[in-house]
Amino acid sequence: MKQIVAECKRYIAQNKQPVPQKTIKRLVFRKEISIPQVQQYLAENMGASFNERLFVLIDKSGQKDSDVYKKALIDRRLFSKIRCDKRYVPSKKTVLALCIALQLTEQDANQLLGSAGYSLSRASEFDLAIAFCLNKQQYNFNDINEMLYQLGLDVF
């Protein structure tokens, strides 16, 4: 475990991006936009929802829903809410737990996170530690939580 923690610390140090000190003011453009234009843009550019992407990944894994939510340490009622409400988006930590339970690659995890409006940030030690685990194909929650604890980070 000490070797894994040391290796994870090096990974975080090498990949962490500094937080910008100054915020840049965003430009606001004033132009008439019609609702049909917005609807057309949405229709042309909208990707799969989190719900859709999650259940495709579960089907591809060959696992039962109950196996996935148990592995992810997710309550049955929360999982039912995810299944039944196509617009429901769980917390980032819940999505990460599902990524680990499904044994996703970092790329697949980022796609699932993206469908929920999240990403693995290079400015977050927790996110980098999870990316490290995904890259090393470490999917055991006990081991991951032990590593996170030793790094002084939140656990699942």
Image: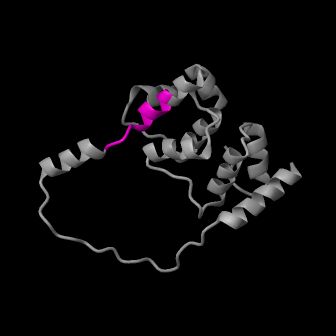
Residue 51 lies in quadrant: top left
Quarter of the figure with the C terminus: top right
- Residue at image location 59% in from the left, 38% down from the top: 99
Residue 116 visible in the displayed image: no
- Residue at image location 13% in from the left, 47% down from the top: 36
Name the dominant secondary structure of the magenta segment. helix
Count of labels shown? 0
Residue 2, horizontal then vertical, whole percent:
88, 53
In the picture as drawn, the residue positioned furthest to the bottom comes out as 22
- Residue at image location 48% in from the left, 25% down from the top: 80
Residue 151, horizontal then vertical, whole percent:
76, 57
Verify whether residue 71 appears in magenta. Answer: no
Compared across the picture, whether 90 is left or right of 149 comes to: left
Residue 77 visible in the displayed image: yes
Residue 108 lies in quadrant: top right
User: Is the residue 69 above or below the residue 1 in the image?
Assistant: above
The magenta span reads 46-56
State the colouring used for the structure image.
one colour
The foreground one among 96 and 46 is: 46
- Residue at image location 59% in from the left, 64% down from the top: 123
The foreground one among 57 and 71 is: 57
Verify whether residue 55 appears in magenta. Answer: yes
User: Is the residue 67 above or below the residue 17 in the image?
Assistant: above
Residue 101, horizontal then vertical, whole percent:
64, 33
